[in-house]
Image (cartoon, rainbow, N blue to C red):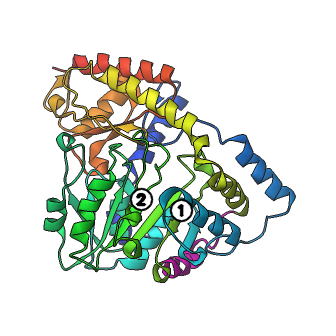
Amino acid sequence: MHSLAKRMENLVESQTLAMARKSRELQEQGIDVISLSIGEPDFDTPEFIKEAAFEAIRNNFTHYTPVPGFLDLRQAICTKFKRDNHLEYKPDEIVVSTGAKQSIINVILALIGKGDEVLLPAPYWVSYYEMIKLSEGTPIAIPSSIDKDFKITPEQLRAAITPNTKLFIFSSPCNPSGSYYNAHELEALAHVFAEFPNVIVVSDEIYEHINFTGKHTSFASIKGMFNRTVTVNGVSKGFAMTGWRIGYIGAPKWLADACTKIQGQFTSGTCSISQKAAKAAILADPLITEPMKNAFLERRDLVLDMLSQIKGLKLNKPQGAFYVFPDVQYFFGKKYKNYVINNSFDLAMYLLNDANVAIVTGEAFGDTHCIRISYATSKELLKTAMTRMKVALEKLE
C-alpha cells in the first residue's frame, strides 16, 4: 500500500484556492456564482509590459536564467527600492523568484527548523502558517481584532517573543484585512525588536501600490531594521501580472545567498520572458499604477456602503489591498431552515450555496470571527453580490 510523506498529513489546502475551485465547479454546472474569493486584479497587464515580453521573445531570451534572476532585473529592483522605498540594496542582495510566494518560502526554509518559532500577527495571509509547518517550525499567532483595525501593539509583540523566536512575518497593506501600518506604528514595533536582535523580520509589501493612504513605509527603512529585514515584493498585484509569476526579495547578502542556494535546487531561475516584462514594470513611473488603485478605492467604498446596510456585520475601513474583512459573530447560532451557522466556515458555505457568492472563511487567516471578501472585480458584479449577500443574511434568525 502506498502512503504519502508524514508532512502531508498536516499540510492544509489553501482555503482561497479551495473556494476558487468550488466556485469554478459550480460555474461549470451552470450555476451563476460570483467569486469574491481570490486575490487577483481583474485588470489586464499594461500594453508596454506585454511589449517588453514580445521584444524578449524576438531577441531570443528563451534559455535558462541565472538562479537569482537576470542582473539587469536585479539592478532595476535596486533602482526601484531606492526610488520608492529609500532602501539601498545591491544586486547580490536581490533574489527573483517564481512569485512572491516562492520568495517567502525560500526565506522560511533558509531560516526555520524544528523548534524555531515564527510570529504571525493575526489575521495573516493564509500560506504563511502552512509554510512554517512545512519547515517544521512553530507558527505563533498574535491576535488582533477589528476594534484595533487588525493591528497588533508593541506590548503584544514583546509578550509573544521567546528565546525560540526566530522570525516575524507580516504584510502591510495586509491580506486579508487591508490594514496598513504607518511609519509611527512601524517605529513602535522596531523599538521592541531592538531588544531582541536575533529576530529577523519578513515585511511582505506586495500590495505597496494599492495603498489608499498616499504613503507607503517599508519596514527596512525604519532606523536599525535594514540589516535584519527581508523586504518581499513583486509585480502581481500592483501591475496586474499575477500569471507572469515574478516576486523578489531584498535581504542581507548572507540570507539572499541562502535563498539562491535553495532556489537552485527547487526551480532554478524563473521565466526569462517574465523577467524582461517585470523589468519594464519596475522601471516605469509608479504613477502608472494610480488608475487601478483609484478603481479599487471606488470599489472599496461601494462595498463598505452596501455592507453597512446589512444588520449584524461589523466593519473597519481598510486602507489598502482589495479586501474587506468583516466581523460576522452576530450570525453565529442563527439558522435558515435546517442550516445552522456555527462559525465563519458555515457562513461562507451558506453564502456560496444560498446566495451563490464565494468568499473565504476567516479561519484560514487566523481569525475565526471574520470572512474575507475580495473586491477585485467589476462594480456591477460587486453590486449584485452585495445584494445577494444581504438577502441571504437577512434570512438567518
**Dominant SS type (magenta):** helix
Q: Secondary structure at mark 2?
A: loop
Q: Residue at x 82, y 54 (%)?
A: 55
Residue 247: where, in percent of width, then height?
A: 55, 60
Q: Are marks 2 and 1 in contact (CB under 8 Å)?
A: yes
Q: In screen coordinates, is 393 left or right of 13?
A: left
Residue corresponding to mark 1 = 81
Does 197 sit above or below residue 278? below
Does 164 sit above or below residue 250? below
Residue 224: image quadrant is bottom left
The crowd level at tag 1 (other Cα within 10 Å; few <14, some 14-19, many 20+) is: some
Q: Quadrant of the C terminus?
A: top left
Residue 89: where, in percent of width, then height?
A: 53, 72
Q: Residue at x 23, y 47 (%)?
A: 367
Q: In screen coordinates, is 112 left or right of 39?
A: left
> Number of marks in the image?
2
Q: CA distance from mark 2 to mark 1?
A: 9 Å
Q: Secondary structure at mark 1?
A: helix
In terms of depth relative to the viewer, which is nearer, 211 or 24? 211
Residue 303: where, in percent of width, then height?
A: 38, 25
First to last magenta residue range: 256-271
Q: Residue at x 39, y 70 (%)?
A: 229
Residue corresponding to mark 2 = 218
* Type of amino acid at the residue the image marks with label 1: Phe
Q: Is residue 258 magenta?
A: yes
